[in-house]
Image (cartoon, coloured by chain):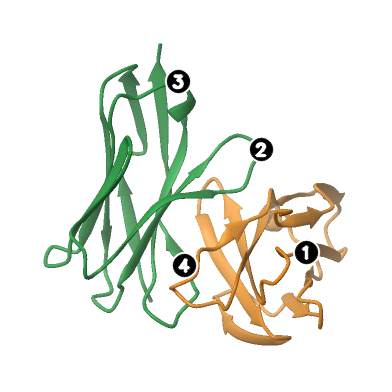
């Protein structure tokens, strides 16, 4: 099955700086890569996703890049704010399969 | 519209007991997936139901089971509870349950096994 690895496990950044989280996946058939943000006491919430026919996608301060050859994808958060502090999960699956394989998560701490 | 709801939010059980957790998906969503979240293993897929049928199953023992009703509400059951079953159990719903659909997660049920 799909195996997703996520690095680093914890990331501390100064407010206003950028944060980057990297994930690798093992199954070359995977073609859908969502990112979720989980705040304390809540379920994960989708913040951005990318499909394998696209190399980069942006949504305001967040962006995701995908390198299919190297089988890795990254989340970029620019101009970080205290409300960006949360656990971020990457995931992967392939077309027709609703089973998401998640990375272990990154705790992002934005220091005011 | 209302989000995914899960009941109860917190549950304490003892080893050997069984437990049933409930998930109500977003109105109109027909797919419900269940995940177990623990600090050590992260989020792990349990199973997915679509139109009352289990369509996909993760690598969990047979003590973990589920079902889906005609209104798309889903329940999962864990029998003969073990200490290691302590976790946050999340359900997620989506329209048709394909990778084209966003999965919306509920707040989870926190199960503690003593």
Residue drawn at the location 81% of the way across and 80% of the way down: B69
Q: CA distance from mark 2 to mark 3?
A: 17 Å
Q: Earlier in the sequence, mark 2 or mark 4?
A: 2
Q: Is residue B39 above or below residue A12?
A: below
Q: Earlier in the sequence, mark 2 or mark 3?
A: 2
Q: Residue furthest top?
A: A112
In screen coordinates, is B103 left or right of B49? Answer: left
Residue drawn at the location 45% of the way across and 20% of the way down: A82
User: Dot 3 surroundings within 10 Å: few (below 14), some, or many (20 or more)?
Assistant: some
Residue drawn at the location 61% of the way across and 48% of the way down: A43
> Helix, strand, or loop for circle 2?
loop
Q: CA distance from mark 1 to mark 4?
A: 20 Å
Which residue is disc 3 drawn over?
Answer: A82
Which residue is disc 4 drawn over?
Answer: A100
Q: Which chain is green?
A: A
In screen coordinates, is A77 left or right of A65? Answer: right
Say if labels 2 and 4 share a chain. yes
């Amino acid at each position: 099955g799909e195996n997703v690895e996520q690095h680093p496990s914890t990331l501390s950044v100064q407010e206003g700086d950028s944060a980057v989280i990297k994930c690798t996946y093992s199954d070359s058939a995977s073609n859908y890569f969502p990112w979720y943000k989980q705040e304390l006491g809540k379920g994960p919430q989708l913040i951005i996703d990318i499909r394998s026919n696209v190399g980069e996608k942006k949504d305001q301060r967040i962006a995701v890049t995908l390198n299919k050859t190297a089988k890795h994808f990254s989340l970029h958060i620019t101009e970080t704010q205290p409300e960006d502090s949360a656990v971020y999960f990457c995931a992967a699956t392939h077309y027709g399969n609703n089973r998401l394989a998640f990375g272990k998560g990154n705790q992002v701490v934005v220091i005011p | 519209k209302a989000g995914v709801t899960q009941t109860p939010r917190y549950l304490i059980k003892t080893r050997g007991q069984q437990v049933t957790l409930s998930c109500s998906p977003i109105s109109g969503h027909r797919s419900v997936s269940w995940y177990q979240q623990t600090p050590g293993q992260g989020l792990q897929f349990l199973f997915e139901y679509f139109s009352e049928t289990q369509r996909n199953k993760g690598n969990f023992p047979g003590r973990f089971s589920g079902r889906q009703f005609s209104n798309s509400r889903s329940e999962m059951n864990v029998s003969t509870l073990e200490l290691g079953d302590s976790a946050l159990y999340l359900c997620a719903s989506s329209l048709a349950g394909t990778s084209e659909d966003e999965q919306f997660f509920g707040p989870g049920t926190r199960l503690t096994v003593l």
